[in-house]
Image: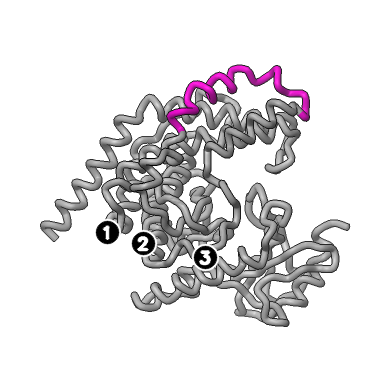
Amino acid sequence: MQISNYIPEVISNFQCSAEAGNVQPYGSGHINDSFLVKNKTAGGPDYLLQRINNSIFTNVEALTGNMLRVTEHLKNKVSSENGDPLKAVMTLIPTRNNQHYYLDSGGNYWRMFYFLKDTRSYDMVSTEKQAYEGGKAFGRFQSMLADFPSNELFEVLPNFHNIEFRLAQLKEAIASNLAGRLETISEELELVEAHANAMLYFQQPETLATLPKRVTHNDTKFNNVLLDQNDEAQCVIDLETVMQGYVAYDFGDAIRTIINTAAEDEADLGKIQLNIPLFRAYTRGYLEHAANFLTDKEIESLVKGVLLFPYMQGVRFLTDHLNGDTYYKIKFPNHNLQRTRAQFQLFRNLHEKAAEIQQIIQKEIGNLKTSQEHG
């Protein structure tokens, strides 16, 4: 049975005023299926309904527990600053039996949120203001959770940003060669091997001993920030991967999508360039909120995250390509290979500009300190 056939059953089991006839697919996520559900009551709130991919997120109860604890903490912070928590934080809708997820008769897990009207998200950043607002959103998100006990969160996806683990997965995929595609990726494997040792920074004993772990979002694509009609940051969304991690992970993954002048899966590698003004704007917005809690070691690690994430995302796409496209949704044959090549080209460009990127980060820190001194 198609997923959409379960929607009437699902909607009827959430505490909402909606009808299945007013449902339409929503968003462009790779993993979950999302639907916009219109309220049948005029003027009432609309809803965002999501089918959780429980082949990837295997412990839905613990994942939901993370989301509830984090959103409650965020709502309290927003309220203490006289903000509107219903606009600034995603709100989970309970089911009829007061759970926050529903298991339908076909074995599918679902959750529902209030839909935040008059907001928009972008798969690609087009203006410095958008980049700046994205930086503010994730910087504020981390800042508000800086006092949350990160070790109490369930590890939703073990080793999610562990490049040592991702390289081991790739090695297994190479050995298995399940889809018979190994002979076509020699150039990509050469790049992986050439930079593997340098990418292990976050697994080094010195790093582990000196770099604090915090609550991190772990999926900071720009389209996970909702902007209002003035392109100002309103809410960070997609909180299912919130768990303990390094701030550089969030920073690096955000930059991966913001600094790229082309799409994540761009076929023409010549179009993949670095938009340094967007990087500078995002960094400024991020540090305005995050610098108040970051350690010097964390600030030093940001550039490491910038380099790591296109490399690691390329490794993950390449692994899925070798395994026969079992993880990411694809739109055409060899889509994951095309994604891999685009990410590795972005990595090459960033690697060449690493010193300049580090200088920008340090300059923005300096500018912030100067502004505060003269505040």
Residue plotted at (81% across, 63% down): 107
Closest to the camera, between mark 3 and mark 1, is: 1
The foreground one among 209 and 307 is 209
Q: Are marks 1 and 2 in contact (CB under 8 Å)?
A: yes
Bin the neighbour count of mark 3 within 10 Å (Cα to Cα): few under 14, some 14-19, many 20 and up. Answer: few
- Name the element at disc 2: helix
Q: Position of residue 209 (x, y in %)?
A: 37, 47
Q: Is residue 230 visible?
A: no
Which residues are drawn in magenta?
Answer: 178-199
Identify the residue shown where x is 41% and y is 30%: 350
Q: Disc 3 marks which amino acid?
A: Asp
Q: Which residue is mark 2?
A: 143
Q: Earlier in the sequence, mark 1 or mark 2?
A: 2
Label 3 sits on residue:
118
Residue 151, visible in the rendered structure: yes
Q: Secondary structure at mark 3?
A: loop
Between residue 235 and residue 219, name the one nearer to us: 219
Instruction: Judge from the rendering whether residue 292 lies leftward or rightward of residue 64; answer left or right.
Output: left
Q: Position of residue 257 (x, y in %)?
A: 49, 42
Question: Which mark is first along the chain, 1 or 3?
Answer: 3
How far is the residue under mark 3 from the one under mark 1? 31 Å
Residue 51 horizontal side relative to residue 91, left or right? right
Q: Residues within 10 Å of mark 2 (few under 14, many from 20)?
A: many
Q: Which residue is mark 1?
A: 292
Dot 1 amino acid type: Asn
